[in-house]
Amino acid sequence: MIRLLIPAIGLVLFFLEPVFGLFSPLHLGDDYYYVVPRFLLMYLIFVSIYYSRKQAVLYGLFFGLLYDVFFIDIIGLYSFLYPMLCLMAAEAVKSIQQNLLVTTALTIGLIALFEFVLYQFFVLISLTSMPLPVFLETRLVPTVMTNFVFLIMLGWVFRSAILPRLTERDKLPGLYL
């Protein structure tokens, strides 16, 4: 049962993302702001940092492929980016202190990188014609800010769900604040 908790949480987050995506775009004043929830990506980054890089990459590949098939119809984009970001997160925490504050900052940075890479890909294949300043103002900044708020609320939950799964020999010093 415990072995199924981490993928079960990932599956729930996979289904929650489109539900929260229904609130986008936000109309404030005369402008529209697009908010894209990235709960699953945040969770996979936490799994790669606090649990297992290998498991996070496998879950990233699986959920990325699901995301490609069900939501964007470009097979390979998310199934490449999710595992790549998990690997980047796991490699980054090898050289810096591993605590919740650093993990949060790293996660927000990787979400911003993820959104920017998606934007560049869609510009490359001419799927969008949005200029970069408009993208930064109406999509990247609102998405990063909103995901930061969700990460503040869910970071402890993610960490609490992952850390008890470690055995005593797997626990490393410096995992706690």
Image: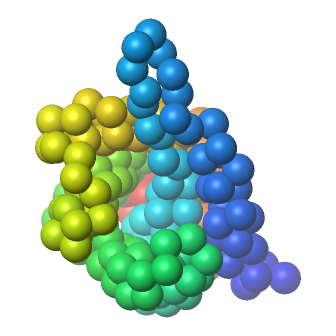
Residue 78 position within the rendered picture, expressed as x and y whole percent measured from the top left = 41, 76
Residue lying furthest right: 1
Q: Relative to 47, is 33 on the left or the right? A: left
- Residue 166 in sight: no
Q: Is residue 165 above or below residue 130?
A: below
Q: Relative to 177, is 16 on the left or the right? A: right
Q: Quadrant of the N terminus?
A: bottom right
Residue 92 position within the rendered picture, expressed as x and y whole percent measured from the top left = 22, 66
Closer to us: 53 or 28: 28
| Coloring basis for residues | rainbow
- Which residue is pictured at 62% across the width and 55% down the height? 17
- Residue 126 in sight: yes
Q: Is residue 105 above or below residue 6?
A: above
Number of marks drawn:
0
Q: Is residue 39 above or below residue 142?
A: below
Q: Quadrant of the C terminus?
A: top left
- Which residue is pictured at 70% across the width and 50% down the height? 19
Q: Relative to 102, is 126 on the left or the right? A: left
Closer to us: 126 or 60: 126
- Which residue is pictured at 55% across the width and 63% down the height? 40
- Which residue is pictured at 42% across the width and 82% down the height? 74
Residue 48 position within the rendered picture, expressed as x and y whole percent measured from the top left = 43, 73
Residue lying furthest top: 29
Closer to us: 38 or 45: 38
Residue 130 position within the rendered picture, expressed as x and y whole percent measured from the top left = 23, 46
Q: Relative to 7, is 106 on the left or the right? A: left
